[in-house]
């Protein structure tokens, strides 16, 4: 059984860094993980591990921009269209793996997750090849500093989730940048937050939107201007209680282990081994009969 983890999320969320961290963790746990780079604009210096499969071997954004005159975003779309037309290339590249986790590093252009058909097509293709696939969606912990930014991140995660229809895990990355107030009291001044405060973001408490920060005047104005929209968002999130984030602190091995165990769980990792035995037996039976 092969497994694929699509690592998605907005630009700079820490996708590539997470891919590196996850592969390191898999390898120190004596499991195998391979990097698949799907970002045609990736800078090679960013990879701690040489990608085992690399879209840049098929097509590079640099060539598309240079030779066809595309800008970076149109060029990305062109690269993915090209990949979709050359899926046999990917099939061949995917051929040599067994019982492995393929960690797929995706580009950060948000429109890739919200309205292009490429990733859903890719996922269906992987599933047809018998590869179990899940997606993780990263937003960075700095999003918690601004409620509106945070909820736009939540909505982008939900939109991508609806678009992809695979087992899904939301991750709050770069938690090492968040200082927790150990005493667990006081306000979130100077970036110091209480655990309770953080958990309202990780478990996504939509009521955060209702109590906007600032003076009373500001609050009243915001509330009247955005009241209807906010109410709709609050309701949307209340009706989808599955929107929650796993905290990821790459400096803490326990945190990576927790994220990995969630990935293993949604992938039903290891459960593929069960049907293997009867299949082997059947083959043996046939061999006897011949
Ligand atoms: N402190 C901290 N910084 C991080 C962490 N993960 C990533 N960064 C930094 O955030 C920046 C972006 O990280 P990347 O891993 O390249 O993010 P990305 O999502 O792959 O970015 P794009 O591919 O451009 O969309 C880099 O400067 C990283 O060093 C983290 O866990 N903690
Ligand atoms: Mg990246």
Image (cartoon, grey):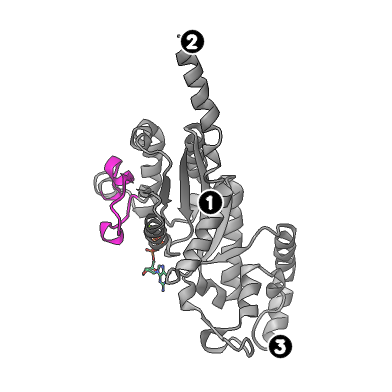
Q: Residue at x 56, y 89 (%)?
A: 189
Q: Looking at the image, which is closer to me, 141 or 24?
A: 24
State the image coordinates of residue 137 (x, y, percent, origin top left): 52, 57
Q: Residue at x 49, y 44 (%)?
A: 119
State the image coordinates of residue 286 (x, y, percent, origin top left): 49, 15
Q: Is residue 42 magenta?
A: yes
Q: Looking at the image, which is closer to me, 31 or 222?
A: 31
Residue 264: mark in rendering: 1
Q: Is residue 131 magenta?
A: no
- Which residues lie in the magenta part? 40-62
What's the distance in space between the residues labelled 3 and 2, CA to CA? Answer: 84 Å
Mark closer to the observer (3, 2): 2
Q: Earlier in the sequence, mark 1 or mark 2?
A: 1
Q: Earlier in the sequence, mark 3 or mark 2?
A: 3
Q: Looking at the image, which is closer to me, 246 or 38?
A: 246
Residue at the spot of label 2? 289
């Amino acid at each position: 059984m092969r497994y694929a983890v699509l690592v998605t999320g907005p630009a700079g969320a820490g996708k590539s860094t997470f891919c590196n961290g996850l592969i390191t963790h898999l390898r120190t746990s004596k499991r195998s993980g391979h990097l698949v780079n799907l970002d045609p604009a990736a800078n090679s210096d960013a990879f701690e591990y040489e990608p085992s499969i690399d879209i840049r071997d098929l097509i590079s954004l640099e060539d598309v921009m240079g030779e066809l005159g595309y800008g970076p975003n149109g060029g990305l779309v062109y690269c993915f269209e090209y990949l979709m037309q050359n899926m046999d290339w990917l099939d061949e590249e995917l051929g040599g793996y067994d019982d492995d986790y393929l960690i797929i590093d995706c580009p950060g252009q948000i429109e890739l997750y919200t309205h292009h058909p490429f990733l859903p097509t890719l996922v269906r293709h992987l599933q047809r090849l018998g590869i179990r696939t899940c997606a993780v969606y990263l937003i960075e912990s700095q999003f918690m500093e601004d409620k509106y930014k945070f909820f736009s991140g939540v909505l982008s995660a939900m939109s991508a989730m609806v678009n992809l229809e695979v087992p899904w895990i939301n991750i709050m990355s770069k938690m090492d940048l968040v200082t927790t107030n150990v005493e667990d009291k006081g306000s979130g001044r100077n970036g110091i937050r209480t655990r309770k405060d953080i958990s309202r973001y990780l478990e996504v408490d939509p009521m955060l939107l209702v109590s906007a920060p600032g003076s009373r005047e500001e609050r009243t104005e915001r509330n009247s201007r955005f009241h209807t929209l906010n109410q709709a968002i609050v309701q949307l999130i209340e009706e989808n209680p599955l929107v929650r984030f796993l905290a990821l602190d790459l400096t803490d091995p326990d945190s990576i282990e927790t994220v990995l165990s969630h990935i293993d769980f949604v992938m039903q990792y290891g459960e593929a081994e069960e049907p293997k035995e009867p299949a082997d037996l059947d083959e043996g039976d046939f061999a006897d009969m011949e």
